[in-house]
């Protein structure tokens, strides 16, 4: 499976995908990484691992439609089979999503539908929950509300800061995202409306549901 990965920041989830591929655990290749920010550290990771990459900045386009058309053009030119949002911090339009039907996944640092949007870890802390986590979901036109592929539960500790909680969640993100991509590559993710079934996966076990098989 050829991946097109969209990033905006440090790229630790990108690195987790690269590590999974290079270790032989993830039968995929990365055709293109696109960053909307030229100073994203994710781009340094691409240079180190010789991954094709491009910067496509919103402010270089007169409107969001032209910006998204360039994203679509680059992804189609790279002939990607799956688009992965790995810390990409722009809300994508229905037009973009319809260009890759059921072929866009996103990693989000909460148990959706709780705490959607930006700063999910801070939202969880401020709300006072004792359990949060991360979600890989299919991207729909509604923000962070797509059919859920996998979720990991992460405890919130009394002395947690946004930083300590984010790091604890991130450790699970780096496992559930490659696992979800592998299930997509194996064709085991079956979607009926909002319901998702990973064929052959073991459900009901925590802290990760469905249970991870490789990562
Ligand atoms: N249509 C969708 N687009 C995106 C989704 C999605 O689920 N559906 N996921 C996001 C990633 N994301 C949370 O997982 C997210 C990213 C950014 C924002 C946001 O409010 N961004 C602001 C400002 C961006 C900036 O500061 O540069 C905005 O775009 O207005 C919310 C959620 C990726 N896209
Ligand atoms: N709403 C989207 C969102 O908050 N995404 C989050 O941004 C971080 C990117 O880290 P990374 O660049 O090191 O992968 C990750 O924690 C990801 O879940």
Image (cartoon, rainbow, N blue to C red):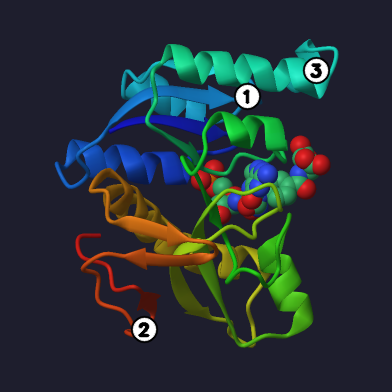
Q: Is residue 126 left or right of residue 131?
A: right
Place of residue 52 in the rendered image (x, y in percent of width and height, measured from the top left): 39, 16
Place of residue 75 in the rendered image (x, y in percent of width and height, measured from the top left): 49, 20
Determine whether label 3 and label 1 are within 8 Å by CB: no
Q: Earlier in the sequence, mark 2 or mark 1?
A: 1
Q: Nearer the viewer, residue 96 or 153?
A: 96
Q: Which residue is drawn at the image coordinates 38% and 80% (left, top)?
A: 207
Label for residue 39? 1
Q: Earlier in the sequence, mark 2 or mark 3?
A: 3
| 31 over 60 or under it: above or below | below
Place of residue 204 in the rendered image (x, y in percent of width and height, measured from the top left): 34, 85
Q: Which residue is drawn at the image coordinates 26% and 64% (left, top)?
A: 199
Q: Is residue 194 left or right of residue 96?
A: left
Q: Distance between the Cα atoms at labels 2 and 3? A: 43 Å
Disc number lying in front (2 or 1)? 2
Residue named by callout 3? 59
Label for residue 160? none
| 64 over 100 or under it: above or below | above
Q: Distance between the Cα atoms at labels 3 and 1? A: 14 Å
Q: Quadrant of residue 17?
A: top left
Helix, strand or loop under label 3: helix
Residue named by callout 2? 206
Place of residue 181 in the rendered image (x, y in percent of width and height, measured from the top left): 34, 48
Disc number lying in front (3 or 1)? 3
Q: Earlier in the sequence, mark 3 or mark 1?
A: 1
């Amino acid at each position: 499976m050829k991946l097109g990965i969209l990033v905006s920041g440090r790229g630790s989830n990108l690195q987790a995908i690269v590590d999974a591929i290079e270790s032989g655990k993830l039968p995929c290749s990365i055709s293109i990484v696109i960053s909307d920010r030229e100073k994203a550290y994710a781009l340094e990771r691409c240079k180190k691992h010789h991954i094709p990459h491009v910067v496509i900045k919103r402010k270089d386009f007169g409107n969001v439609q032209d910006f998204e058309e360039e994203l679509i053009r680059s992804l189609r030119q790279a002939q990607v089979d799956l688009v992965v949002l790995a810390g990409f911090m722009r809300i994508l339009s229905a037009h973009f999503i319809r260009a890759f039907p059921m072929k866009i996944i996103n990693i989000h640092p909460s148990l959706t539908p709780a705490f959607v949007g930006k700063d999910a870890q801070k939202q969880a802390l401020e709300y006072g929950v004792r359990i949060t986590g991360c979600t890989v979901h299919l991207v729909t036109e509604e923000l962070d509300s797509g059919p859920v592929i996998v979720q990991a539960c992460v405890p919130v500790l009394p002395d947690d800061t946004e930083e300590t909680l984010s790091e604890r969640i991130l450790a699970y993100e780096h496992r559930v995202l490659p696992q979800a991509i592998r299930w997509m590559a194996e064709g085991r993710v079956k979607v009926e409306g909002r319901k998702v079934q990973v064929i052959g996966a073991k459900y009901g076990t925590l802290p990760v549901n469905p249970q991870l098989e490789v990562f």
